């Protein structure tokens, strides 16, 4: 067994080096969370709220100012965004007997169990915020679509995600003047949605060599000014952090599954305690042990009204 030095905290054991390794290992595995905007929330407790200022576009345009005129005045909508901080985590109990009679390696348990669980949980929670966007786009045919702005799809998707739909979804973001990610929009797609597009995309290395500064985790290519990120969990499973379940999504048309095209900003993140590893204080005379991952954080979609929305969902009524 690897020798790990644990320090005693309030009710548990911790290791700073292990926590840092855990966080660094989790980050590149998350598809949705890499696009959040971070708001510091140190000092907050479970159930408390974090606020941030949201600034909308100026109400009237600026223009020519004659020498004899005063400077025109406009208005700007300022609103407060709010999110709630909650606890997230999971644990694996084990006994002294199991540890003593097996090749018990804490690092392997973290890598093969807790890390995967933390990534699915936290990325799944963030995807649920992306899903709160009011903009829903349904491909009703290979060259037809239905767009709604109230957060509810009104038709069954019967088309694969093709070049036509990518262009039309991008156009909706452009008409709303949604800011891009270094000149391109981004779309996170399920394995099913990505499959039909991969042959038509530019290779990641074609455009990163010509100016794009960063390759996103899971990025597979670019098409029509949209960079695609492929996801194998949160876009394919309906994650419920309260019930602790992940139910496979399905569309009756069986042509595709969820996808989200977006500019910035997307979702606001507030972190009090970054995801970390905790070891249970030994009880029952050294016989009962356990190891867990834990985080104290919160997420909230930045813009929930249709006029200011930054995310459009590739969707279906069923």
Image: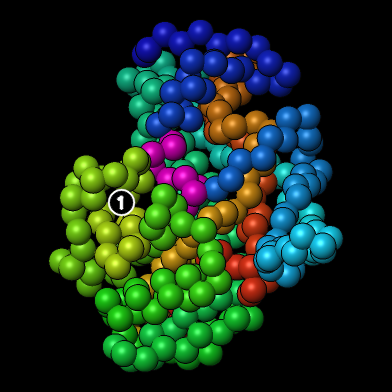
Q: Badge 1: how crowded within 10 Å, few (<14), some, or many (20+)? A: some
Q: Nearer the viewer, residue 258 or 171?
A: 171
Residue placed at 41% from the left, 71% from the top?
Answer: 170
| Prevailing secondary structure of the magenta residues | helix
Q: Residue 243: image x %, image y %?
A: 61, 58
Relative to 291, 242 lies left or right: right
- Residue 141, x across and y down, in percent: 33, 91
Residue 254, compared with residue 234, is above or below; it is below
Quarter holding residue 21: top left
Q: Find residue 86 and report its image quarter.
A: top right
- Asked which colour scheme the image uses, the reply is rainbow
Q: Position of residue 185 (x, y in %)?
A: 41, 60
Residue depicted at 82% across the width and 63% down the height: 69
Instruction: Please name the residue that numbered disc 1 is placed on.
Output: 219
Magenta range: 26-35
Q: Is residue 171 left or right of residue 86?
A: left
**Is residue 303 found left or right of 24 in the rendered image?**
right
Asked if residue 48 lies in the magenta stretch, the reply is: no
Residue placed furthest toward the left: 199
Q: Secondary structure at mark 1?
A: strand
| Residue 223 shows in this picture | yes
């Amino acid at each position: 067994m690897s020798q790990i030095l644990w320090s005693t905290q309030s009710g548990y054991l911790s290791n700073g080096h292990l926590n840092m390794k855990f966080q660094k290992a989790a980050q590149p595995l998350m598809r949705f969370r890499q696009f959040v905007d971070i708001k510091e929330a140190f000092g907050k407790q479970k159930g408390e709220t974090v606020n941030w200022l949201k600034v909308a576009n100026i109400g009237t345009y600026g223009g020519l100012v004659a020498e004899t005129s005063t400077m025109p005045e406009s208005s700007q909508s300022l609103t407060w965004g709010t999110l709630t901080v909650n606890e997230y985590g999971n644990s694996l109990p084990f006994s002294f007997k199991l540890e003593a009679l097996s090749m018990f390696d804490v690092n392997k348990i973290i890598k093969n169990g807790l890390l995967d669980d933390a990534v699915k949980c936290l990325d799944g929670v963030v995807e649920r915020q992306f899903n709160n966007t009011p903009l829903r786009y349904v491909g009703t045919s290979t060259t037809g679509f239905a767009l709604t702005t109230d957060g509810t799809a009104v038709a069954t998707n019967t088309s694969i995600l093709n070049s036509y739909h990518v262009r039309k979804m991008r156009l909706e973001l452009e008409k709303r003047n949604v800011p891009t990610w270094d000149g391109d929009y981004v779309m996170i797609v399920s394995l099913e949605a990505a499959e039909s597009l991969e042959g038509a995309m530019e290779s990641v290395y074609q455009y990163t060599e010509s100016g794009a500064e960063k390759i996103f985790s899971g990025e597979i290519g670019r098409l029509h000014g949209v960079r695609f990120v492929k996801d194998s969990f949160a876009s394919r499973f309906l994650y419920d952090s309260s019930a602790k379940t992940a139910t496979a999504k399905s569309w009756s048309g069986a042509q595709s599954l969820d996808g989200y095209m977006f500019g910035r900003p997307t979702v606001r993140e507030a972190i009090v305690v970054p995801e970390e590893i905790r070891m249970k204080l030994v009880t029952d005379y050294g016989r009962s042990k356990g190891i867990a991952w834990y985080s104290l954080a919160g997420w909230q979609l930045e813009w929930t009204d249709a006029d200011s929305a930054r995310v459009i969902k590739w969707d279906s009524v069923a």
